Image (cartoon, coloured by chain):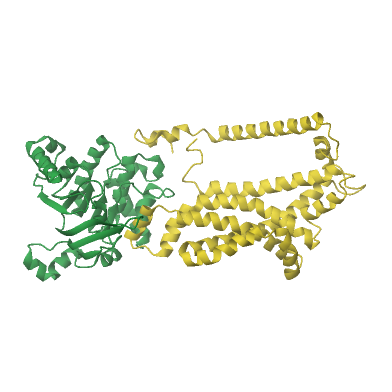
Chain colours: A green, B yellow
């Protein structure tokens, strides 16, 4: 993996920290111009290091720039100032290197492709041989427990199933970083809890670094190894809370005292 | 797929899709019903206002004239019009293929270059405001009367709806669908082939249906100044001259022209059903 190669290569950062970050924001600002010509500060002086195999949730009020931060990391949006380093490269190089798997709030499945063909989309773009595309997409489909739906079209699936396909598609080409922008925000509470359990399983199996945007405190605490709390506009990092709940995390962990304690800690951070 | 395979959590859209046979029967039933209403209205208006056969010939004589010889010992009018329709349809098909291709290529170019779109679109629009009747004689002079002039004039009417609709389809791709492609570092070509064109297909087929009927009109108009006597254009010109003695012949010719347009439309609709399989047209029904 390129990750481990980078860990060896970047000696200076290895000296500063035990492990080199996989994504590093250094003094990142982002300004937007509104339609009326006013300048809005969406992000202010973001300094944040994310380490390999971490599950980092970013939580904050609406409009705090969470999605903007994710898009800057993904090279879908440039920062106004500051620097982002991904695996020792610029976000642009990392994108061209195909290191990002993206999952959006909507599943964004291509409606003219069957479920299996949707998962194969990135593999086609990346010119994988046909046989490998076939076997890898079947493998991913089994991982999200949709093997029986390979030839269905997206409109035939429920919202939760569509989002599972989106996750399978994002992980199909083995990206080193999974970027998720409120992936379960449009789902009902019960489906959402089931998806959380599945995502934790998948993360446990793949050990991919995950950056996860969410509105839900419970979801963030249950899933994450670390939670970044952001303030309202301009978005700033206000607290950085490690979540040391044990792994594997059974759904019952959500009823423990420790869980409630962490939830109120995050809530306090949001109020600050 | 069976409904059982869809499972519980799947949306129940599949349950509402009636069987193919039932749908076809319903469509045919509606068509026949509307036809009967039109016949009753036509004959009713004729009787109510006491209109003579020059204004509105009897439907029976319009249909009947198709099965009468045009002159003693000559073929039936229906046979003559059928071969004329086939001739016109061939010219129209060629023009349709040419016009649709040009229209599609223009749309792809415009979708990728705002500058070219702004620069060229006014001319494309202007081309459609000039009456085709005024242009047809010039094209015949340039290209000589024949297949090519017919095809070019039909293409002139065909390319515009294809350009406008295809362009709309190509650029109306949802932003996140594009971001997804960007996150894969896809090339513009890959984005065009794997995202923009499939997304635009429903728009393209809408345009092709309009273009198919327009190409028939174009081919008929193209035949008028060229003196070609094998198509519907000549038949229309000819029977218009003898309208006072046999009005039902012009009406019959128009009927055949309309049927030819329906055939062209139906052919495109059939291809659409075969190509756009992922979204059954009745899923919202």
Q: Is residue B141 visible?
A: yes
Residue A133, given in percent of the width and then of the height, sits at: 34, 56
Residue at x 81% of width, y 38% of height: B56
Residue at x 70% of width, y 31% of height: B37
Q: Quadrant of residue B224?
A: bottom right
Q: Quadrant of residue A96?
A: bottom left
Please indicate whether residue A59 sits to the left or right of residue B275 in the image. left
Residue at x 81% of width, y 29% of height: B47
Q: With respect to residue B198, does B50 lie above or below?
A: above
Q: With respect to residue A102, does A151 lie above or below?
A: above
Q: Can residue A131 be seen in this view?
A: no
Which quadrant of the figure contains the N terminus of chain A? Answer: bottom left
Please indicate whether residue A117 sits to the left or right of residue A235 in the image. right
Nearest the viewer among B19 and B11 is B11
Q: In which quarter of the image is residue A260?
A: top left
How many marks on residues?
Answer: 0
Q: Residue furthest right?
A: B72
Residue A210, given in percent of the width and then of the height, sits at: 20, 53
Q: With respect to residue B67, does B108 lie above or below?
A: below
Residue A240, given in percent of the width and then of the height, sits at: 11, 51
Please indicate whether residue B80 sits to the left or right of residue B72 in the image. left
Nearest the viewer among A218 and B8 is A218
Residue A66, given in percent of the width and then of the height, sits at: 23, 52
């Amino acid at each position: 993996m390129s990750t481990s190669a980078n860990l060896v290569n970047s000696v200076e950062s290895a000296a500063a920290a035990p492990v080199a970050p996989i994504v590093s924001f250094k003094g990142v600002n982002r300004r937007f111009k509104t339609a009326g010509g006013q300048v809005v500060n969406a992000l202010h002086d973001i300094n944040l290091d994310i380490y390999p195999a971490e599950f980092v949730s970013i939580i904050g009020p609406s409009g705090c720039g969470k999605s903007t931060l994710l898009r800057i990391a993904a090279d879908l949006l440039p920062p106004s100032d500051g620097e982002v380093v991904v695996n020792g490269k610029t976000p642009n190089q990392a994108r061209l290197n195909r290191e990002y798997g993206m999952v959006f709030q909507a599943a964004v499945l291509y409606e003219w492709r069957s479920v299996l063909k949707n998962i194969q989309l990135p593999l086609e773009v990346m010119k994988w041989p046909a046989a490998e595309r076939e076997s890898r997409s079947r493998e991913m489909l089994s991982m999200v427990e949709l093997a029986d739906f390979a030839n269905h079209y997206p409109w035939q699936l429920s919202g939760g199933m569509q989002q599972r396909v989106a996750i399978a598609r994002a992980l199909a080409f083995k990206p080193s970083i999974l970027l998720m922008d409120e992936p379960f925000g449009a789902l009902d509470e019960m489906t959402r809890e089931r998806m959380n359990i599945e995502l934790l399983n998948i993360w446990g199996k793949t050990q991919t670094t995950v950056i996860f945007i969410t509105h839900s405190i419970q979801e963030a605490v249950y899933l994450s190894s670390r939670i970044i709390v952001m303030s309202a506009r301009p978005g700033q990092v206000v607290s950085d809370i490690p979540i040391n709940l044990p792994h594997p995390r059974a759904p019952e962990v959500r009823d423990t005292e420790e869980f409630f304690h962490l939830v109120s800690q995050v809530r306090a951070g949001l109020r600050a | 797929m069976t409904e059982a395979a869809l499972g519980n959590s799947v949306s129940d859209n599949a349950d509402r899709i009636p069987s193919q046979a039932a749908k076809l029967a319903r469509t045919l039933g509606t068509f026949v019903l509307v036809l009967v209403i039109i016949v009753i209205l036509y004959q009713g208006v004729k009787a109510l206002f006491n209109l003579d056969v020059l204004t509105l010939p009897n439907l029976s004589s319009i249909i009947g004239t198709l099965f009468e010889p045009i002159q003693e010992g000559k073929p039936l009018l229906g046979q003559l019009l059928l071969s004329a329709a086939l001739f016109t349809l061939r010219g129209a098909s060629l023009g349709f293929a040419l016009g649709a291709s040009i229209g599609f290529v223009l749309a792809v170019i415009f979708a990728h270059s705002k500058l070219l779109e702004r620069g060229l679109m006014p001319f494309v629009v202007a081309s459609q405001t000039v009456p085709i009747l005024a242009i047809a004689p010039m094209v015949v002079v340039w290209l000589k009367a024949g297949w090519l002039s017919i095809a070019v004039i039909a293409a002139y009417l065909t390319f515009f709806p294809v350009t406008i609709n295809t362009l709309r389809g190509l650029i109306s791709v949802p932003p996140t669908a594009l971001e997804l492609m960007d996150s894969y570092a896809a090339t513009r070509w890959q984005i065009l082939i794997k995202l923009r064109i499939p997304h635009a297909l429903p728009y393209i087929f809408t345009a092709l249906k309009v273009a198919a009927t327009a190409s028939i009109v174009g081919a008929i108009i193209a035949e008028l100044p060229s003196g070609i006597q094998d198509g519907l254009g000549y038949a229309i010109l000819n029977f218009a001259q003898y309208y006072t003695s046999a009005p039902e012949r012009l009406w019959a010719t128009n009927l055949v022209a309309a049927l030819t347009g329906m055939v062209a439309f139906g052919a495109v609709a059939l291809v659409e059903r075969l190509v756009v399989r992922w979204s059954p047209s009745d899923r919202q029904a």
